[in-house]
Image (cartoon, rainbow, N blue to C red):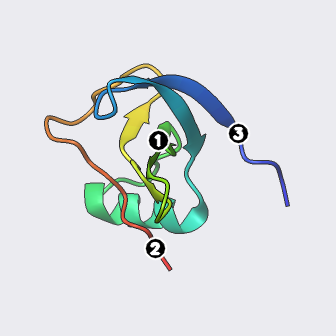
Amino acid sequence: MATQRTMKDYCWTCGADQQHRQLDKKEEAWLKERLGRAGVGEFWICVNVLDPDTGRQCRNLRTGFNKKPFAEPLKIPVLE
């Protein structure tokens, strides 16, 4: 399995620089359906842990160049 790419960049829902990663295949499929697009490779997901007890992450989406690509935050749910 290939190593997942990560970057540290600003998350506007967390209000600070946070670690982000590229989407996995299930997340890409969910976002493609949600947006009605064929490709979503430019999106990154914030993996900042908001609750250390449960491990709940922020999961807000951004692109490499746009910290706020949607008017309202779009957060990917945890997909099984």
Q: Residue at x 32, y 52 (%)?
A: 75
**What residue sits right under mark 3 in the picture?**
5
Q: Is residue 54 left or right of residue 3?
A: left
- Considering every residue shown, the one lying at the far bottom of the view is 80
Counting every numbered tag in the picture gives: 3
**What residue sits right under mark 2 in the picture?**
79
Q: Residue at x 14, y 35 (%)?
A: 71
Is the Cβ of the residue at disc 3 closer than 8 Å to that at disc 2? Answer: no
- Identify the amino acid type marked 1: Cys
* Quadrant, the N terminus: bottom right
The relative height of residue 32 versus residue 73 in the rendered view (above or below) is below
| Callout 3 crowding tier (Cα within 10 Å): few <14, some 14–19, many ≥20 | few
Numbered tag placed on residue 46 in the rendering = 1
Task: Find numbered disc 2 in the image and state the secondary structure of the residue it sits on.
Answer: loop
Is the Cβ of the residue at disc 3 closer than 8 Å to that at disc 1? Answer: no
Q: Is residue 73 left or right of residue 66?
A: left
User: Residue 58: x, y in percent?
Assistant: 39, 48
**Quadrant assignment, res 6:** top right
- Identify the amino acid type marked 2: Leu
**Quadrant assignment, res 78:** bottom left
Task: Find numbered disc 1 in the image and state the secondary structure of the residue it sits on.
Answer: strand
